Image (tube, rainbow, N blue to C red):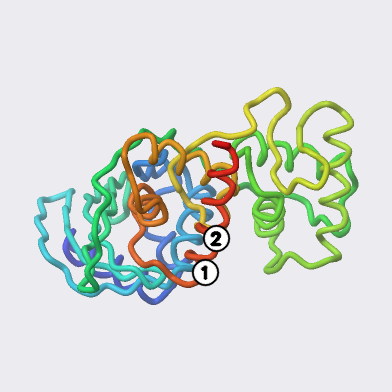
Amino acid sequence: MSTPRELLDRHLRLMQAGDLEGVLGQYHEDAVLVRFAAPVVGKAALREHLGAYLAGRPVVKEVLNVAASDDVVSYQAVVEHAGEEQRTYGALFLRGERIARQVSGLFPVTSGEGRRKSGVHVDLEPYTAWPSRAVPDPRSAGREAIGPALLEIVAAEGPILAERAYRLYVKASGGKALTSIARAPLSGSTFRLRQAGAIDFEEGSEVLRPAGTPEVRVRELGPRALDEVPLREVAELMRRLRAAGATELPRAVLDAYGLVRMTAKAEDFLAQAEQVSLMADV
């Protein structure tokens, strides 16, 4: 029988190896993962959440502290994820030799590259991720099957980039990539949902939202990559940060989202958002 410390060590090894099935095998079917953004409940939701996390290729750099009892093990570690160092801490609550409940938090690690915190705080809404479930293959399913599932995604995560919504659907259907063949019926279902009055989006807009809901919501990053955040959402965050006294807005946005490294891609994206923010103030 494995000890709680051995279970934690195996958990970290499987995470670093990117073994999603191995990691999921450590959880009970009704397991709950509590994060800052929102709780993740059940195997299906864990698959979506952990799959997105493992895509960032986490590397455990150092295990700092571990404390264990018969059915609980707490830990702190430094992990490199998507090229950024983060301090992760949490606790695994066990039932038998599997995880029944997990509490986990991530904080950026100050880099040696002279990273400076903005020192400015604004409140962000929690981000609610769609609890992934099996959906029909968009290439063969009819509109009656695609529409309700796509509406679920938009209702949970909207305003959401159409690209992210379509990728979530394709992944839930068992697909690996959003191809043009899969995109066409998803795009068609999007237009039909708007015609039915279920969702809203402006002509030429890539952002979908439930009908009658705000066009912009400033939320935590959640499971999104930075470039999966709607541009106007980042621009509104910048406006609020500026009002709160921030001067280096791109850096302040990364701080607000708990990100560390300013990549060239992030710099370009945030420059666009800053232009949108400034135009909104004119």
Q: Position of residue 271 (x, y in %)?
A: 52, 59
Residue type marked 1: Lys
Q: Position of residue 40 (x, y in %)?
A: 44, 43
Q: Position of residue 180 (x, y in %)?
A: 83, 66
Q: Which residue shows up at 59% across the image and 47% down it?
A: 276
- The label number, if any, that marks residue 269 in the structure image: 2
Mark 1 to mark 2 CA distance (whole Å): 6 Å
**Does 56 sit left or right of 9 as displayed?**
right
**Does 103 sit left or right of 41 as displayed?**
left
Q: Is residue 113 above or below residue 169?
A: below
Residue type marked 2: Phe
Which of the two residues, 99 or 233, is positioned nearer the viewer here?
233
Whether residue 41 is visible? no
- The label number, if any, that marks residue 203 in the structure image: none
Q: Position of residue 37 (x, y in %)?
A: 40, 41
Q: Is residue 208 above or below residue 254?
A: above
Asked if marks 1 and 2 touch (Cβ < 8 Å), the reply is yes
Which residue position holds label 1? 265
Q: Residues within 10 Å of mark 1 (few under 14, many from 20)?
A: few
**Does 101 sit left or right of 233 as displayed?**
left
Q: Is residue 199 above or below residue 231?
A: above
